[in-house]
Amino acid sequence: MTMTYRSARWLIVPVAALSLSACGINSVPTKEEAAKAKWANVEAAYQRRADLIPNLVETAKGAAGIEKSTLESVVQARASATQVKLSTDDLNDPAKVEAFRQAQGQVSNSLGRLLVTMEAYPDLKSQGRFADLQTQLEGTENRITTAINDYNGAVQDYNTTIRTFPDIIGAKIVHGAQPMTPYKAISPNADTAPKVNFGQ
């Protein structure tokens, strides 16, 4: 009789462990940490872009006649964007995520204006340094897009996990899990087709 009780007691341990793991005890924090790691990649990609901007601006200063205001807008946008911090604890606050997105969007817009302006300077475009920086910047923009897509995928996985049975049990009762905010990297008026004027 004692052996049966002891055997049964040892069988309860694995069954309890399986039950707990099926209730989100482990999956919720695992997926949350995965999303946070993906966010770190987004931040790293934006930091790489911020690091490239001073070199790009310095190179552009060498072009005679380039508008000072264009350069200043890029420098100012970069400075403003680096002031907006978003910790992993803020990823469930849509207002903070939106503030970060807007700051980075201003950098994107300013950089776009700078690059369009610089197209008018063939001497600058032919410089190896400028061409190298432009290539690095394009590569960085691609990294940013990829990092954002990866982060949004991880957020979707996490948010789905904390809202579906049986993981919702551990998510709410044990972890007090809150949904994370996906990152929408959109440019202002991106839904409006640009007007093309060929001078006619």
Image: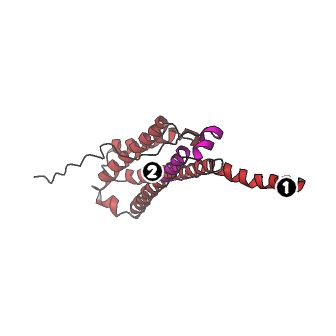
Range covered by the magenta-colored residues: 153-181
Q: Which residue is mark 2?
A: 53
Q: Secondary structure at mark 1?
A: helix
Q: Is residue 63 left or right of residue 97?
A: left
Q: Quadrant of the N terminus?
A: bottom right
Query: Mark 2 vs mark 1: which is more N-terminal?
Result: 1
Is residue 179 part of the magenta span, yes or no?
A: yes
Question: Where does the image place residue 90, in percent across and percent down from the top left?
Answer: 55, 38
Question: Where does the image place residue 48, in percent across and percent down from the top left?
Answer: 50, 53
Q: Which residue is mark 1?
A: 4
* Residue at image point 43% right, 60% down: 139
* Residue at image point 42% right, 53% down: 56
Q: CA distance from mark 2 to mark 1?
A: 72 Å
Query: Are the two marked residues, 2 and 1, in contact with CB atoms closer than 8 angstroms?
Result: no
Instruction: Give, as a three-letter code, the residue at label 1.
Output: Thr
Question: Where does the image place residue 176, in percent across and percent down from the top left?
Answer: 61, 37
